[in-house]
Image (tube, rainbow, N blue to C red):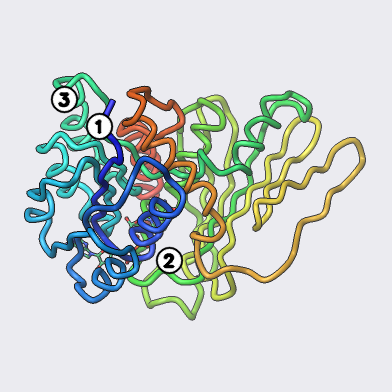
Amino acid sequence: MSKTPIRVGVIGTGIMGAGHARFLTEHVKDARVSALMDVDESRMGALAKELGDGVATFTTAEDFYAHPDIDAVIIASPDALHVPHLRLALAKGLPTLCEKPIATTVDDARTIVAEVEATEKKLGKSLVHLGFMRRFDPSYVKLKKMLESGEYGAPLVARISTRNVSSPGITTPGLYTNMAVHDFDIWRWLTGDNWDSVVTHYPKSNSLSPAGLKDPLIFVAQLKGGITMVADVVANDNYGYDVRTEVICEKGSVEMGIFGDIITRHKMVAGVAQGGPMVENWIPRFEDAYIEELKAWIATMTTGVNNPNLATAADGLAAAEACQMGVASLN
Ligand SMILES: NC(=O)c1ccc[n+]([C@@H]2O[C@H](COP(=O)([O-])OP(=O)(O)OC[C@H]3O[C@@H](n4cnc5c(N)ncnc54)[C@H](O)[C@@H]3O)[C@@H](O)[C@H]2O)c1
């Protein structure tokens, strides 16, 4: 058990890093933000000012990790920096919540997960968790309970939409490694099953998206037990953040709407989806999930007890392996 408050350093102060820092400050007892690191000094400075006194700022990861007032780290830097930033955290033996993906290629994921597991074994404790926050989202938690209740029969097909308003700088493989990675993880968590295959299909590309970007993608993925996911991944939908799921089961359909509302079609009665103004990004839709994830992560340090819902480095690797199957099917 660690002494409180746990002093958390945050690497990357963009949308996610700032979100985590605010949620931690406002909603998580036993923790406070003690340090920030970003190469964008003005963005980092504005966040430090907002968080108040006692937040140190650094422009290099080396200086950040040398700061004595950091007990735990949140990595919210760009995807390609997660591996080097994790490696520095491991060298210090610091508990780390690393945003997804664990790495942008499966080879890098395998290498860093081996390093994580060797360090965890040496120290005799879990050190690294991944930011697969949907596991803490009340709607996904409810969906899991509904599927497990048996009332709707066995799940057969998942129809998924993962759509950003815009995704500056994203590449075609990034539609898997940056976006669909969440769907691969949450379906492992919902079912306890592992991915067997992923095949990409190409609809007409959006003429408003950057030249050369295959946007949107459709993919069909199958879990080993046969549940099949048919997903659209849209990097630039130009209309609002839109994440939805419908699970077709043997005796009914359970759908999660844009607002996390649950709609069922069962025993000849059809529910209706909630409508209303849409949001720009994931922060408002998944606010509760981020807060619960942070509380669970901090509790692992204050109680010394692991939380099985927190994604591990191995979960990050399993998601990376599914992404790789998708990327390998691109042409
Ligand atoms: N779990 C989720 O729901 C979720 C949602 C969105 C993004 N993410 C992940 O979070 C991470 C950050 O995404 P974002 O949307 O906040 O991006 P962002 O572009 O808003 O922020 C990234 C920040 O990292 C900073 N940065 C760049 N180089 C750096 C370096 N060398 N060291 C430290 N900081 C550096 C940038 O200046 C920027 O402030 C990504 O890996 C992304 O995939 C997770």
Can you tell which of label 1 and label 3 is closer to the viewer?
A: 1
Q: Amino acid at mark 1?
A: Leu
- Rounded to the nearest angstrom, the CA distance separating label 1 from label 3 is 11 Å
Residue at horizontal 27%, vertical 59%?
78
| Mark 2 closeness class: few <14, some 14–19, many ≥20 residues within 10 Å | many
Tell me whether circle 3 and circle 2 mark residues in contact (CB < 8 Å). no
- Rounded to the nearest angstrom, the CA distance separating label 3 from label 2 is 38 Å
Q: Position of residue 149 (x, y in %)?
A: 72, 24
Q: Is mark 2 within 8 Å of ligand 1?
A: no
Residue at horizontal 39%, vertical 34%?
311
Residue at horizontal 27%, vertical 50%?
75
Label 2 sits on residue: 214
Under tag 2, what secondary structure?
loop
Q: Amino acid at mark 2?
A: Lys
Say which mark, if any, is on residue 161. none
Residue 213 falls in image quadrant: bottom left
Q: Is residue 262 left or right of residue 219?
A: right
Q: Position of residue 320 (x, y in %)?
A: 34, 41
Residue at the farthest bottom position? 208
Residue 36 sits above or below residue 205 on the image:
above
Q: Is mark 1 within 8 Å of ligand 1?
A: no
Tell me whether circle 2 and circle 1 mark residues in contact (CB < 8 Å). no
Q: Is residue 91 left or right of residue 275?
A: left
Label 3 sits on residue: 118
Say which mark, if any, is on residue 127. 1
* First-in-chain label (1 vs 3): 3
